[in-house]
Image: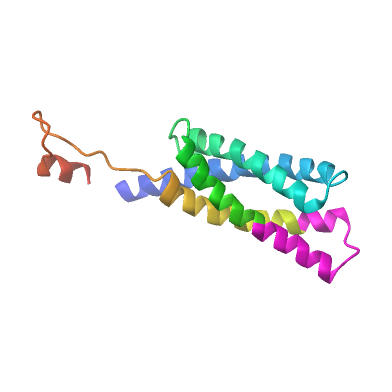
Amino acid sequence: MGGLRLLRRHAAAFGRFAGLGSGVTLVASGALVLLAQWIPWMAANALTTVASTVIATELHARVSFGQGRPGLACHLKSAATMALGWLVTSAAVGSLAMLCPGAGVVLRQTVYLSATALVGIGRYVVLRLAVFAERAPRPRTTDGARSRAAYDAVA
């Protein structure tokens, strides 16, 4: 019974992560299209990636993973995952530009959003396992020493 409950909890967390991440990504995608009219696409992608990473990290910590407000260390780790994501999305759109120089905004955004979806799945795994990992509480006896029986009851 505990395994099914754990599976449901992680599925719900992934659903919240995907929903929030998709919403932030769609807003960032729109901002990217607008910014790219005034500055180079790579710079616009970098700016929207930074802004959306800060916003998404706050939302994921609080809503997706129920961890409360993330500290600087969580933001930095999350930013590292997004730096890799920026490279992947940039490589995808850069490859499209080389393979199909006249690609329109719809095709460019389709490639960008597809690459972002793949990055998002990898990001969820890293955030769940490394950044916002659930830590089992360390039970203590009344005198402060760890109780093996209490630890076994939690594990």
User: Is there any visible trace of residue 1 in the rendered image?
Assistant: no
**Residue 33 in the image: x percent, y percent?**
82, 45
| 120 w.r.t. 73: above or below | below
**Residue 123 in the image: x percent, y percent?**
54, 52
Residue 50 falls left or right of residue 142: right
Residue at image location 11% in from the left, 44% down from the top: 148
Extent of the magenta region: 87-110
Residue 95 colored magenta? yes
User: Between residues 67 and 14, which one lies in front from this camera angle?
Assistant: 67
| 35 w.r.t. 96: above or below | above
User: Is there any visible trace of residue 4 in the rendered image?
Assistant: yes
User: Between residues 143 and 121, which one lies in front from this camera angle?
Assistant: 143
| 5 w.r.t. 99: above or below | above
Task: Give the main secondary structure of the magenta stretch.
Answer: helix
Residue lying at the far top of the rendered structure: 142
User: Between residues 107 and 8, which one lies in front from this camera angle?
Assistant: 107
Task: Please name the colour scheme applied to the rendered image.
Answer: rainbow
Residue 91 falls left or right of residue 148: right
**Residue 13 in the image: x percent, y percent?**
48, 43
Residue lying at the far right of the rendered structure: 102
**Residue 32 in the image: x percent, y percent?**
78, 45
Residue at image location 91% in from the left, 63% down from the top: 102
Residue 152 falls left or right of residue 113: left
Report the number of discs.
0
Residue at image location 71% in from the left, 43% down from the top: 48
Residue at image location 11% in from the left, 33% down from the top: 141
Residue lying at the far left of the rendered structure: 143
